[in-house]
Amino acid sequence: MNTRNFKCFQTVYEERNLQVAAGKLFLSPQGLSKIIKSLEDECGTPLFIRSKEGFIPTESGKLFYEKSKVVSRDLNELFSSIETLNDKEKRFKVGFAAGTIRAIDIPKVNDFMESNPEVLASWSEYENEQIIRRILNDEISFGFVVGKPNNSNLVTGLVKSIDLVAYVYNGHRLFDEKQVEISDLKTEKIISMNEKYHVYHDVINACHLNSFNPNIVARVGEGESIYRLVKNRVGIGISPKFFSDNEDIKAVEIKDAYSWDVYGVYREDSADRDLAKRFLEAMNESK
């Protein structure tokens, strides 16, 4: 019995209408009718009574429905378990600190993952410190983080360096400036990435070093939100320079601001250090 046909039977049972069920399954009514007839032949009994009111399940049909749901669920769990085991066998796992996916060469990373079958192709973001901790605990083999970790057990390499800028909307007093100091933002409404991003804490620290608390009116989860809020004049956005200037929004350089540096990181004593080294070299080639 072809278990994929269980879904066809279940849909007809639930809809009581061959035309509607066929539409949901992207099948022709004729094709779906043949599948139901094939199931009935295998069972040796009618599963539906065809009537003007639609497909009415027989007692055998009701039993078949209940049992088929159990079988479908068990098969889904089986396939899910097999997939999980397969993932565990792929020992080389990569982690991304929040925001780093926007900065790295995604095609280069994807090509490396696909050409090395031992790499688990998973694109999961975590907080910066979580990535470092998971590498040190040998939970992942390689990580992209913001800022160079200060740990002698880690091998690091700069992958991407991006300037930190202030995004200003057209009509704002700073729009025509080529450069501003962090102190110029003392009275401004600030839009920033949220607390899980390394850049948020760096902005706070920079303002404190200039003897003021920033008026952060929005903490967002991705760069597009900063851009939209600035465009609608909610405030000034502080972010790595991810967007090009246009007539509505301009990136203004922040004097003496640090650059937003993305590093590739792996444990020096990792069992996968050779693969990690090749991965880091591949990322450096993309700069």
Image (tube, rainbow, N blue to C red):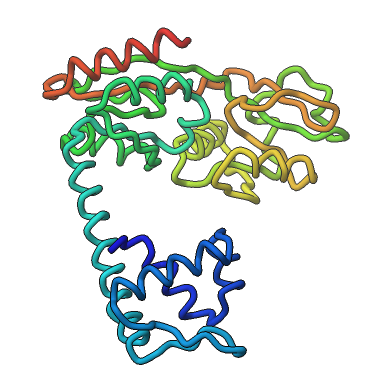
- Residue 78 appears left or right of 287: left
Q: Position of residue 67 (x, y in %)?
A: 27, 79
What residue sits 65% from the left and 44% below the top?
A: 225
What residue sits 37% from the left and 21% below the top?
A: 263
Quarter of the image that includes the N terminus? bottom left
Residue situated in front as seen by the camera: 81 or 123:
81
What residue sits 39% from the left and 25% below the top?
A: 147
Residue situated in front as seen by the camera: 77 or 280:
77
Give the image quarter of residue 158: top left
Q: Position of residue 212 (x, y in %)?
A: 59, 40
- Residue 145 appears left or right of 155: right
Give the image quarter of residue 27: bottom right
**Considering only vertical position in the picture, is 36 above or below 31?**
below
Q: Position of residue 119 (x, y in %)?
A: 26, 29
Residue situated in front as seen by the camera: 147 or 13:
13
- Residue 118 appears left or right of 183: left
What residue sits 33% from the left and 10% below the top?
A: 281
Q: Position of residue 175 (x, y in %)?
A: 81, 28
Give the image quarter of residue 207: top right
**Considering only vertical position in the picture, is 62 above or below 162?**
below
View extreme (right): residue: 171
